[in-house]
Image (spheres, rainbow, N blue to C red):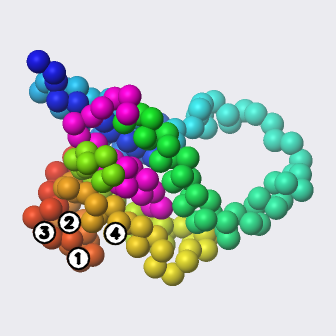
């Protein structure tokens, strides 16, 4: 008999650095599902190679014109760049889903990412959204170095909320945040974060 197959997509960049807690949480949650007999395929779609710990002793070359432009344009181009990543992301996720043929897609909410939500809807795959944090609120509040278009990151977050079949969050406060965005309360399940 075929095992129920779950595919998990995560877009965290610094898995074993700043996002260590979130990384371990996802690994433990999905490993628990494996112990209950589910087949789980993990995909860390944005993980960087190496780590800061490995790079600390390296020397930096003097600033080039390209680095200067990148530094000064990053503030303006960050949001368009993040949104543009959905196009190659969609085709990469499509290839994974076609190969894996999952019964359920679990996706971690990430600001500006909506490709997996659209893919799940297109292919009629049940879609569970892991909302570990209020991504739009965090982006606006804690990343003032980026110029964000008014309401755009919130709109994209809401697309994910609406397209998800269910949403699981880590606290009642986060559940309230999602519900205040117009999402029915019975669609949002609280799985408390813990140590």
Foreground mark, 1 or 2, reads 1
Mark 2 → mark 4, Cα distance in angstroms: 14 Å
Q: Residues within 10 Å of mark 3 (few under 14, many from 20)?
A: few
Q: Residue at x 50, y 43 (%)?
A: 91
Mark 1 → mark 2, Cα distance in angstroms: 11 Å
Mark 1 → mark 4, Cα distance in angstroms: 9 Å
Q: Is residue 49 left or right of residue 3?
A: right
Percent position (x, y) of residue 98? Answer: 38, 33
Return the residue at label 1: 182
Name the N-terminal-most of marks 3 and 2. 2
User: Is residue 107 inside the magenta stretch?
Assistant: yes
Numbered badge on residue 185? 3
Is disc 3 placed on a helix, strand or loop? helix
Above or below, 179 against 132 in this view is below
Q: Is residue 62 left or right of residue 36?
A: right
Percent position (x, y) of residue 34? Answer: 20, 26
Name the N-terminal-most of marks 3 and 4. 4
Q: Quadrant of the C terminus?
A: top left
Foreground mark, 2 or 4, reads 4
């Amino acid at each position: 008999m075929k095992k129920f197959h779950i595919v998990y997509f995560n877009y965290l960049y610094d898995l074993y650095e700043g996002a260590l807690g979130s990384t371990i949480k996802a690994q433990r949650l999905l490993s628990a599902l494996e112990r209950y007999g589910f087949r789980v395929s993990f995909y860390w779609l944005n993980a960087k190679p190496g780590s800061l710990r490995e790079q600390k002793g390296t020397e930096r070359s003097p600033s080039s014109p390209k680095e200067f432009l990148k530094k000064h344009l990053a503030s303006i181009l960050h949001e368009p760049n993040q949104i543009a990543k959905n196009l190659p992301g969609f085709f990469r996720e499509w290839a994974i889903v076609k190969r894996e043929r999952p019964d359920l897609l679990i996706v971690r909410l990430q600001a500006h990412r909506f490709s997996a939500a659209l893919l799940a809807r297109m292919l009629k795959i049940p879609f569970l959204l892991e909302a570990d944090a209020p991504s739009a609120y965090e982006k606006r509040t804690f990343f003032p170095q980026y110029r964000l278009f008014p309401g755009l990151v919130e709109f994209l977050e809401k697309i994910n909320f609406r397209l998800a079949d269910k949403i699981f969050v880590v606290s009642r406060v986060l559940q309230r945040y999602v519900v205040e965005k117009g999402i029915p309360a019975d669609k949002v399940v609280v799985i408390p974060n813990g140590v």
